Amino acid sequence: MADLELKNLFKQYDDAKGTEVAVDRVDLRVDDGERLVLVGPSGCGKTTLLRCIAGLETTTDGKIEIGGREVQDLTPNARDIAMVFQSYALYTKMTARENIGYGLKHSSTLSASEREQRVEEMAEMLGIEELLDNNPSEMSGGQQQRVALGRALVRNPDVFLLDEPLANLDAKLRAHMRTELQRIHSELDVTMVYVTHDQKEAMTMGDKIAIMDDGEVQQVASPEEAYDHPNNQFVATFLGSPSMNIIDATARKDSKGVTFTHENKTLARVSSSYIEGINDGDDVNVGLRPEDLEFTDSATGSSFTCRVTVREYQGNSNYIHLKFADKELTSKVPTNVTPDVGDDLEVTVASEDIYVFDPDSGEALK
Ligand code: ATP
């Protein structure tokens, strides 16, 4: 069993400029054979966390366990971990065969012919058998990335770490390699941690995603759970494109439910079953996903009037930019919905699609 567990992991950098906490007491578990995607904005601590697991950074405090064995004080080689970087880091003067074989350099138990066999099996799995005698300069970015994957995976690591491995590939190849990586992962059944700053990539790649901000893990969940039930406003706005609309509002409670108003205008209404934890007069942030905004023909008790400011054609949808009081909202609608700029529209959002956050802590209230 090679499950990976981080316990109270803490990493701070001390240099002449002062102290920087990069990883702030992270608890995280990745089960044996599971694929976890670590996602968050630039500087949130993803790379540092991964480098701590790999042993390329010392940890300031906390534990790292692989298969129940504490590894935080072991050298990188003693951890049974393989890592792939954005920059491939291939040896330019070696062929693909030599680069992949280099991954077995520290393996004393294999004979030369067993090593050769392992390299060829790996090349076959990655679809690069024909390239084994080429140098990296004779390969495309995607082919080089496969060689880098082969070099990492050939020694059958317990844990496989990838740091933005597809960032240097063009959009089409990136999409292809994403599916390839999922296939490779399911064939090898290796415990995998994959770092990206791209929320779309995270949603498609992860069995589970861990969303990080400012050194802390904000939520660990399946992509669907994190998208539908974000713990807080950070997660809610980080996942989804265009991102969730956030409007500051006041809660007005009556016997049937709560009405949220912004500048005394009704914005949304939810029935009583949804409103535990929200009190009359509370200041809250209301979150509305662009795809949940619906246009209706006439005003209702829970609709609000918006003016269309911009219409953007996106191929498979239209983004309609709207003005509501002093707020700019974005809606995502089918391409046959084509209001004109300057039109006034009635907009509603179903009770179950309304998100409510504490404006101070960002915590989800509904
Ligand atoms: P990116 O997506 O841009 O690579 P990241 O989420 O991987 O960002 P890290 O590179 O882990 O973030 O950086 C986390 C924080 O630690 C940042 O504030 C960064 O400035 C700081 N940091 C990283 N490496 C060092 C270092 N060697 N010395 C000092 N501070 C560092």
Image (cartoon, rainbow, N blue to C red):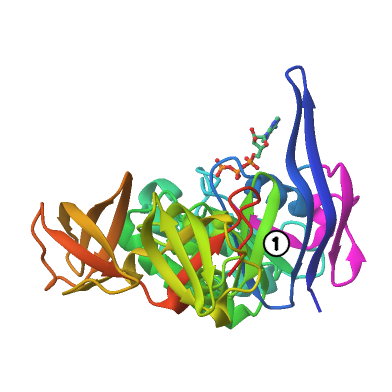
What residue is drawn where x is 91% and y is 66%?
69
Q: Is residue 96 visible?
A: no
Q: In the rendered view of the protein, which quadrant contains the C terminus?
A: bottom right
* Residue in front for this viewpoint, 7 or 118: 7
**Amino acid type at mark 1:** Leu
Judging by the rendered image, the residue that carries numbered circle 1 is 104
Q: Which residues are magenta?
A: 58-84
Q: Nearer the viewer, residue 359 or 102?
A: 359
Q: Residue 337, how many percent across, how many down? A: 14, 71
Q: Residue 292's quadrant in the figure?
A: bottom left
Residue farthest to the front, as pictured? 255
| Observer-nearest of 141 and 310 | 310
Q: Is residue 307 left or right of residue 254?
A: left
Side of 226 relative to 166 (left or right): right
| Image position, residue 88 (x, y; %) | 52, 49
Say if the magenta span includes residue 44.
Answer: no
Q: Is residue 61 magenta?
A: yes
Q: Residue at x 86, y 41 (%)?
A: 60
